Image (cartoon, rainbow, N blue to C red):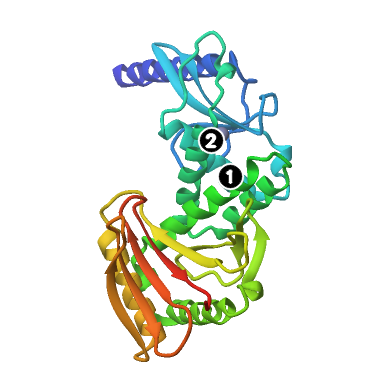
Amino acid sequence: MIFRSIIFLISIIALTIISIEEAAYAQFIPLSPPRISNPYCTIPTFQYDNIPARGYSTIIPVPGGSAPIIYMQGAPFTGNPELLHFALAHECGHQVLGHIVFNHINPFAAFMTVAEEYAADCWAAHAVMQSNDRAAIQAAVADANSFPAPTMPNRVKNIISCAGNIEASSASDFAGGNESSAFCQNLQKTIEAAKGQFAAIKGSLLDGQTFQTKAALPGLTCSLDINGNGQDSYSTCETGDLDDDHLDSNYENLKGRVGTCLGGTWAATPRVSKSGKTFTRFEKNGAPGYVEVHKESVRHKGSIDVWPPV
Ligand SMILES: [Zn+2]
């Protein structure tokens, strides 16, 4: 009997806790809202259409304090689960990066700065690339491109760059095999294209002078900068990390990868730029142009530049 009473008491307490939680959420969302799974963070995520944006991260009052919560609309993601992946991760990013200030009077009054949007995009790009979800990156880029806002090309560039950075920092990127062969093929293609002002690999315009390149090197973020007069074009492919920890190893790996691809007929010379940055220039006897691998300590990145013939 005593056991039964204790179990009964525990049940009552458990029910009470559940109903208090539900009541707290019910203040801002309908009772029993569909909770949806969010693989990118442990914050409770609900589908709820009555929010001021497609996705919304906020903090709501609960007994004894406050709790983070994420809402997602349903319709914008119908038939586009890849975009939902990125959007879920983006909202997690706002929470994890501490962008949300608790407003107990109106939890829907939280608005983000542009810098915070970029940071949440970058966090999301890293998060989805942890499961190699390139489709989510593509969906986010297509989505951003569908808005006519002038800031969107830069937002797209940021997403691509952040996704590229996580690719470059994974060890398997430098392990050789098929990916290495694709890397080499595309590097050769880029060098060949340099003879024709890169026209053969020029993709869509990202901003005023930067183009996507069709010859992306696996593990790197590539773009093509056209500086105006047609003579000073170059292709830039960047790898990098958000901290200094991988700067040296990225540079050494990249140098080795490029050297292996170009073979013994290209001479590698270590150099230091006027601003003190380390780089290696690969030159082929008699061939115009060169390939450079840079260790850019200011931007915490390594990069490859392929210069056209002069
Ligand atoms: Zn946002």
Look at the numbered disc 2 and say if its residue's Cβ is closer than 8 Å to ligand 1: yes
Say if 170 sits above or below 1 in the image. below
The answer to whether the residues at label 1 and label 2 have Cβ atoms under 8 Å apart is yes
Task: Tell me: 139 left or right of 265.
Answer: right
Residue 300: x percent and y percent? 34, 52
Q: Quadrant of the N terminus?
A: top left
Residue 121: x percent and y percent? 52, 43
Residue shown at 63%/40% (left/top)?
151
Residue shown at 47%/76% (left/top)?
183
Residue 229 seen in this snapshot: yes
Mark 1 residue type: Arg
Marker disc for residue 155: 1
Q: In this view of the protein, which residue sits in the foreground, 208 or 12?
A: 208
Task: Tell me: 37 left or right of 98.
Answer: right
Residue 237: x percent and y percent? 47, 65
User: Which residue was labeled with disc 2?
Assistant: 117
Residue shown at 74%/42% (left/top)?
148
Binning the other alpha carbons within 10 Å of mark 1 as few (below 14), some (14 to 19) or many (20 upward) gives many
Q: Residue furthest top?
A: 105
Q: In this view of the protein, which residue sits in the foreground, 142 or 287?
A: 287
Q: In this view of the protein, which residue sits in the foreground, 266 or 165?
A: 266
Residue shown at 53%/58% (left/top)?
133
